[in-house]
Image (cartoon, helix red, strand yellow):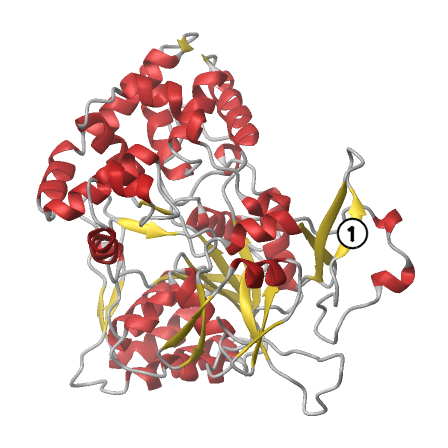
Amino acid sequence: MPPRDVFINPFILKAVIPDEFFCDRQSETDNLIGLLKNGNNVVLKSERRVGKTALLHHMLGDKRVAGVYDTYFVDIFNTENERQFAGRLATALFKGNVSVPFREKLLALLGRFRIDLSPDLLTGFVKPSVSFDGAAVPDYRGGIESMFDLLEKTGRPAIVVFDEFQQIEDYPEKRLSATLRTRIQNLNHVGFVFSGSERRLLDHIFNTSTEPFYRSCTDMELRKIQKDVYVDFTSRMFGKYGKSVDKESVSDLYDLLYGYTSYLNTVLNHSFMRTRERGFCGSETILDSLSDCISGKDLDFHNTYFGLSSQSRSFLKGLAVRRGSSSITSAAFLESCSLTASQAQTAAGTLVGRGLKDRHVVKDPRTGVFSIDNRFFEIWIRNMMGQSLGSQLSQASDFVREDPRDGLRKDFPSVSFFSKEEAGTYDKYGRLLQPFVTESIDRKITGYLVQKGPDGKPWSLPVEDCMALMEGILSLPVRKGENHPLSEEEKKVLAGGGILEIGNKLFQFDLPSMMVRRRYRTKSRSKTPGFGSGDQ
């Protein structure tokens, strides 16, 4: 345990968190390490601010990985082209957990690159930075291939993590993914994790049949830490330092911030700091801390908000008051923001933006819910409209939306209700031909969609939860530039595990990805069709 004068606050706001201050994620860590040790490359998907980067650093520091593998963390967030990608990769290799011989070979390889080894002015430690001289090294892709070759030639097992990997989709140079896929599939000693927070782009890269990375990795999704787990963790951390905290207030804060650990840790870091030794952190302390976090961003939020058009501001007000909306053209939502349907759609398109720099609104691809991306900004807007922070905190639980994914289980609802014949009626790709009808714990008859997951085990989800997820899927692409609007009856077919044929194309709901995917007929076109996976 580090001395208390090093870590005086357990709510650490950095990506690398010591084990004793790391909340939960044991099963996710075990799963990720298990997949890598068994030769799988992994695509890790999550929303922003739920702790994806912290989990990756936690995994790399685990004793089952550290000291066994050479590890490299490549953050390509904000890179704009191949040159910058190659520079980030080279920097990560130079700074990684490597042997002296490897470092010497890398230096020889990087002789073609420009390396800055100037010391950090604050710490005095050398912080290497690698960049490329375009005149000397015009073939950045060749430099990337050379670095992968060097990794393989060491003969040592290694793990390379690319964080925010979807960024390569915005590069002006095309087909970098083809180069990466070609090199990666020939590496026998290196495992890869591709992580990102843009599900649509990651699905395009890894689940589109025409893309080089198609079906080359195992999907893994990181969800928010459950409320009871986080509340218990908070209480335990306060107790570790002789302090106590009001669990009910922490629960309300969790609801107000939608369970995003980045925001929660920020507020609780301030709350812990405000609580004296052997003191009690109650709702007033948490409110004061929340106020500090909001007021610290007041000027930024003010400039952002009043820099938008009046329609965009009205749209944000509507989302803030309603805590998001799955139907921005409904009469109730339009009344709340005083916009017409066309104005609301225009504002939504503008605010969703094309990238993180101009994004103020996000849309959940599964439930179709629009919400304000920055939760502090949302609270600031409501506060500006006259709703106090205290009332927002006390009323937060009234606006909690149940996540349909909570019904997903990596097993049958109750194996005793299924015969051996029923348990074996899968198609060649592990999709059950018909959903199970079983009996729930309270003896109600319930329909379940059951499919085999990527781990080979059956996954199940109540059909009613599948139907809730269908609400966010308004249409399916049937031809280039042409979408087919989904009717309620068609959604019911998909939610029940059925196969929907539209324009001679077949679609089915896929549990592991929680998406509707295109399926392809086999050449035999038998009565029991086998389906491959495509992207939708």
Give whichever of 495, 393 is nearer the camera: 495
Residue 67, horizontal then vertical, whole percent: 56, 56
Q: Secondary structure at mark 1?
A: strand
Residue 62 percent across, percent down from the top left: 56, 48
User: Can you say whether 10 is above or below 159 in the image?
Assistant: above
> Which quadrant holds residue 322?
top left
Whole-percent x, y for residue 191 in the image: 55, 68
Q: Is residue 473 visible?
A: yes
Looking at the image, how many numbered discs can be counted on the residues? Answer: 1
Give the residue number, with chain letter if any, for mark 1: 437
Q: Residue at x 43, y 57 (%)?
A: 365
Badge 1 density bin: few <14, some 14–19, many ≥20, Cα 10 Å: some
Q: Amino acid at mark 1?
A: Val
- Above or below residue 300? Residue 471 is below
The foreground one among 388 and 521 is 521
- Give the residue displayed 49% in from the left and 42% down from the top: 224
Residue 273, compared with residue 504, is above or below; it is above
Which quadrant of the figure has residue 274?
top left
Q: Residue at x 63, y 54 (%)?
A: 31
